[in-house]
Image (spheres, rainbow, N blue to C red):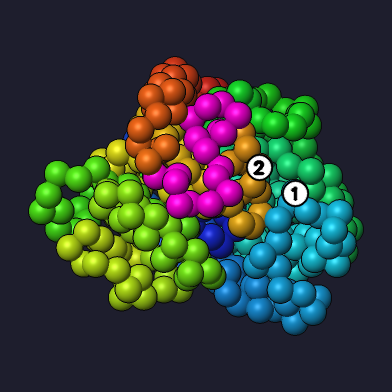
Amino acid sequence: MKALFTTFPAYGHLLPMLPLARAAAAAGDDVVIATHGDLHGAADGLPTREFGPSLPALMAENDARSGQDVLGYRNDRSDEAPDLLAATVALFTTTYADLAFDEMLKIATDERPDVILAEMWDFVTPLVAQRLGIPWVTFVHSPATVVDAVLAAGAADAGARRDLVEPAPLATIQLWPDWLETLPRSGGSETIAISSDAYDTAARIDIPAFDDDRPVVLVTLGTVVDDLELLRSAVRAVLDAGANALVTTGFTATPADLEADPARVRAVSFAPIAQLLDRVQAVIAAGGSGTTLATLSRGLPIAFVPRIANQPQVAAAVTALGAGITPDSLAGAVPTLLGTPSLREAAAEARTRLDQRPSPATAWSTLRSRIS
């Protein structure tokens, strides 16, 4: 059987799908990853196809069409910025379809997959699946949001412009657990749960170990850091608390931009989060769902500095669970993060619950039976 995995062109959308893709390949099935070439390196040996615009090109085109810069959009403030909401919906639906539909149609026609697996914010590929009559599966890696209905309407608009109606998915692969949901999720298709694996590769990162025995805190705001001062503030908070900082600066900043004591800071633009989590006792993060699930899968507490998209919602869910904090100020957050037993106990309980979910191999076997 051949499976085509597709994703919106951002690391946070691709990385959560890769354990399932690797499980499919390990089971002897043909796997192809279709996404922009900027992300192909993360697939680490899996066959890839070039698909769609890069994220910067897509955002630039969408900004030009809408006159809105959507980078700072937060879905918990949608009622305060209707024009920004409309532009954000277009980014994922109508604008993306205009730039990527024909490419995906050609890829799917050439590859002739038996099934297409599209991550939850790829609203283009399901339309292609409808055009070609190929069953598709949605991969849910993030919580339900207040804007899901608006996104669905945008997807319907993108389909209507091509005389298509998005078909119902054959199944839903559910990475984000229901016990971390804060809103009801609309369903309809069979749900197949899957465990959360922290992203890793065979290649090892080359970051020197610290020279002392201080606790280490990972500071990561994602692959796009548009607030360098926030990143610096988080690093300062770690150092002021007497800990060392392991930092990812993303692709828009550099380790030199941190302006911090090199003896107590180790920094890299990007690295597999599994290898970073092996070195730390706690995490400061923006609240991306992939980073959050990876951290909880290691039983580590998190301090959130949420800014965009669904990050505030993710932070609220983990804070309510007792495994994280969302402080008004980072000044006292690190001592709380490192010194509060209940946070670590709740994170350990979250790890146990995540471990009890079906493995990627089991999830793939279940899905494969459903496809057959």
Residue 147, percent across and down? Answer: 79, 48
Q: Residues within 10 Å of mark 2 (few under 14, many from 20)?
A: many
Residue 209, percent across and down? Answer: 14, 53
Please tell me whether residue 334 is drawn above or below residue 55 in the rendered image.
above
Rounded to the nearest angstrom, the CA distance separating label 2 from label 1 is 7 Å
- Which of these two is toward me, 361 or 77? 77
- Which of these two is toward me, 129 or 328? 328
Please identify the residue farthest to the bottom as the structure is shown. 64
For mark 2, what is the residue? 313
Closer to the chain start, of discs 2 and 1, is: 1
Q: Please report the residue visible at 35 percent of the width from the left and 37 percent of the height from the top.
A: 338
For mark 1, what is the residue? 76
Residue 131, percent across and down? Answer: 76, 53
Q: Identify the amino acid type marked 1.
A: Asp
Q: Identify the amino acid type marked 2.
A: Gln
Using the rendered image of the protein, determine whether residue 205 is visible from the camera's viewpoint. yes
Please tell me whether residue 135 is drawn above or below residue 232 in the rendered image.
above
Pointer 2 and pointer 1: residues touching (CB < 8 Å)?
Answer: yes
Q: Which mark is residue 59?
A: none
Please tell me whether residue 361 is drawn above or below residue 256 in the rendered image.
above
Stretch in magenta: 318-334
Quarter where residue 337 is shown: top left
Task: Give the SS element for disc 2.
Answer: helix
Task: Give the SS element for disc 1.
Answer: helix
Q: Please report the residue visible at 71 percent of the width from the left and 38 percent of the height from the top.
A: 144
Using the rendered image of the protein, determine whether residue 44 is visible from the camera's viewpoint. no
